């Protein structure tokens, strides 16, 4: 039996307002210029939305900090930008993410190798995208962020396994988002991998190989 | 990671509330201190707006804000395949502020946006 071809990142996402419709998206590697743009054009608007877990994130600090800290830990980050098409047919940044490659798999009860860890993700507020940047149909990016992690994990030899922690600033609603996205929630009584020096607060999520494949397959038509 | 890239990376900061650039030693010390925290703890620290307490630096200012819009032809999509060491180093360099990157580096921009030798899986 031949091996499966590597998956690409998706190029279409469902519209946030109407999930039956799809909108164009593109994914690029994140540079310093992207973080400067986001901090200047999106960050100040997010800061006023008190319910957002990412309202105080500064991406121009996050990008170097994450890279440096993970280098000390002998891991590497992969940082991506998601763009969406605006009314002028050009693309504008709509999402930012930083994930860690080759991270300990959160479900220590399962005999599996490492995984990828989805560390920081931020989708531009749809109202901001529409009003400030002329995006008629802002994309729903929750599953796309996770898919990026799954695809990199699959292509990197980690069978799609991913993990993440839902920031407590996101409250219960953020937990609901990840459950709806199809991730498994690590029970709060479950132990964490030994190298994670923290007790389990019940806000960790993960996808095993089967869940990851199901999530990725569902988006295959959009690649 | 090549030592030169690491050293350059460490030199790209200013101390907050100060006029002087941070020393490499100060940045290294702060990074090592941060690395004692778990990823979940760092996420919470950042979300609480407290990162500056442990990492009192910011990238050297004066960067121009890129345009809001980019045409499809200008976008080079990221590869979903594992990156080579050279490609990783190129991405690390691209995460540096533009002023410091103004020094010519041959083939830089293309290597970032379209890593050589890697094509998107079809």
Image (cartoon, grey):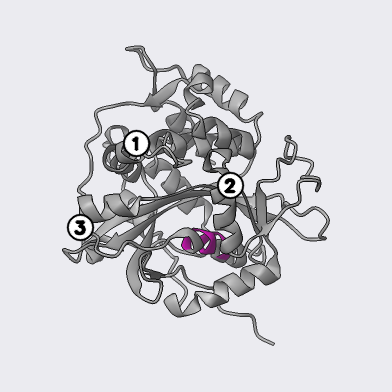
Tell me: residue B100, above or below residue B29: below
- Residue A43 in the image: above or below residue A27: above
Q: Earlier in the sequence, mark 3 or mark 2?
A: 3
Q: Is residue A84 left or right of residue A213?
A: left
Residue A27 within the segment the image draws in magenta: no
Residue A203: give x, y in percent of width and height. Answer: 66, 46
Cα separation between marks 3 and 2? 31 Å
> How many residues crowd mark 2 within 10 Å: few (<14), some (14–19), many (20+)?
few
Residue at 67% in and 67% down: A159
Residue situated in front as seen by the camera: A50 or B114: A50
For the residue pair A142 and A77, the one nearer the viewer reads as A142
Give the CA separation, mark 1 to mark 2: 20 Å
Residue at the spot of label 1: A48
State the image coordinates of residue B73 (x, y, percent, origin top left): 23, 66
Report whether residue B13 is seen: yes
Identify the image quadrant of residue B63: top left
- Report the chain holding disc 2: A
Position of A97 compared to A207: left or right? left
- Position above or below: B60 against A110: above
Q: Is residue A204 above or below residue A45?
A: below
Q: Residue at left 55%, top 66%?
A: A151
Asked if marks 3 and 2 touch (Cβ < 8 Å), the reply is no
Q: From the image, tell me which residue sits under label 3.
A: A134
Looking at the image, is mark 3 or mark 1 nearer the viewer? 1
- The quadrant of the rendering that contains the N terminus of chain B is top right
Magenta segment boundaries in residue numbering = A144-150
């Amino acid at each position: 039996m031949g091996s499966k071809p590597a998956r690409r990142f998706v190029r279409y996402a469902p519209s946030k307002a109407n999930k039956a419709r799809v909108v164009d998206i593109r994914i690029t590697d994140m540079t310093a210029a992207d973080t400067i743009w986001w901090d200047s054009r999106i960050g100040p608007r997010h800061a006023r939305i008190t319910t957002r877990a990412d309202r105080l994130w500064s991406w121009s600090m996050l990008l170097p900090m994450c890279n440096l800290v993970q280098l000390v830990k002998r891991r590497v980050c992969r940082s991506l930008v998601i763009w969406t098409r605006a009314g002028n047919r050009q693309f504008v940044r709509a999402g930012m993410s930083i994930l860690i490659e080759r991270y300990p798999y959160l479900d220590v009860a399962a005999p599996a190798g490492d995984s990828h860890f989805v560390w920081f993700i931020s989708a531009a507020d749809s109202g901001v995208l529409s009003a400030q940047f002329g995006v008629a149909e802002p994309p729903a990016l929750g599953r796309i962020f996770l898919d990026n992690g799954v695809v990199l994990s699959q292509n990197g030899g980690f069978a799609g396994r991913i993990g993440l922690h839902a920031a407590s600033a996101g409250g219960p609603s953020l937990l609901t988002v990840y459950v709806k996205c199809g991730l498994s929630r690590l029970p709060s009584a479950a132990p964490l991998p030994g190298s994670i020096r923290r007790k389990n607060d019940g806000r960790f999520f993960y996808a095993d190989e089967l869940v990851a494949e199901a999530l990725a397959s569902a988006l295959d038509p959009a690649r | 990671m090549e030592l030169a890239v690491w050293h350059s990376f460490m030199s790209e900061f200013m101390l907050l509330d100060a006029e002087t650039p941070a020393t490499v030693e100060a940045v290294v010390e702060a990074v090592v201190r941060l690395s004692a925290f778990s990823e979940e703890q760092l996420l919470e620290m950042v979300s609480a707006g407290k990162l500056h307490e442990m990492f009192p630096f910011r990238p050297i200012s004066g960067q121009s804000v890129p345009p809001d819009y980019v045409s499809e032809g200008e976008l080079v999509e990221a590869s979903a395949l594992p990156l080579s060491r050279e490609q990783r180093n190129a991405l690390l360099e691209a995460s540096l502020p533009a002023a410091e990157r103004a020094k010519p580096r041959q083939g830089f921009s293309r290597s970032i946006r379209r890593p050589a030798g890697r094509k998107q899986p079809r």
